[in-house]
Amino acid sequence: MSTQVNKKLFFRHKIFSSNLTFIIFCVIFAVLIFTRFSYPDSKSDFTWDQIDNAWAAKDIIYDHKLPLVGMQAKGNTGFYIGPYYYYIITPFYMATDLDPYASVLIAGVTSILTFLFIYFLIKDMFNEKIAMLAIFFDAFSFYIIGLDRTQWPVNFIALVSLVIFYSLYKIVNGNSRFMLLLLKHNVYRHPFKKIFSGCARWFYRI
């Protein structure tokens, strides 16, 4: 029993520098959970985009139609994103039997992933204090809370952007293995390629 406790304490201290930091992290994480999942009927949107996503999931689950084209990017432009997002959300609708609450779960899980990536990647790039400050703003920002309560592909922009920024940081510091991660994300074919390529040029000037 004491061995298991020691292992847990060792694992905790590998991630957090002190018990106080661990407690603060847990409190901020609890706030994140409350602000993203509470009052789903009145605080979470289920409108055009979410209904479109639910129908796509229904087509996959019950009609066995596999979409090759995703959502329309904007208005009636005729530009469409890839279908990958439909496949990501389908397990949630399958687990809830097409209950609209799946939309809340998808947005909430994406928010949790973003929260964890923010903490661990920023901690690695800078230090623990800056990482704690970053997740504090992520959890308490009214603007971010509002975005995180709506389920749509935009939820992944912050997460993907952070991963690409982190990869650039690692590459500039001599870790070329992260170049594969950038290639995997197809940075130069991404809608935000100008932003990311600008970040790359800025990094190489430093």
Image (tube, rainbow, N blue to C red):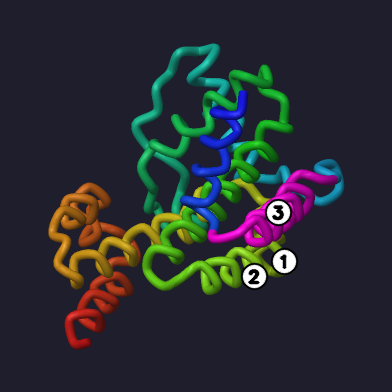
Q: Position of residue 195 (x, y in %)?
A: 32, 74
**SS for dot 1:** helix
The quarter of the displayed image where residue 108 is located = top right
The residue where tag 2 is placed is 137
Report the quarter where the N terminus lies: top right
Given the image, on which type of amino acid does mark 3 rest?
Leu
Q: Position of residue 178 (x, y in %)?
A: 20, 55
Q: Nearer the viewer, residue 5 or 114?
A: 5
The residue where tag 1 is placed is 140
The residue where tag 3 is placed is 32
Q: Nearer the viewer, residue 190 or 58?
A: 190
Q: Residues within 10 Å of mark 1 (few under 14, many from 20)?
A: some
Magenta: main secondary structure equals helix
Outermost bottom residue: 205
The part of the chain drawn in magenta is 17-38
Residue at 13% x, 59% y is 176
Residue at 22% x, 87% y is 206
Given the image, on which type of amino acid does mark 2 rest?
Phe
- The reply to whether discs 3 and 1 touch (Cβ–Cβ < 8 Å) is no
**SS for dot 3:** helix
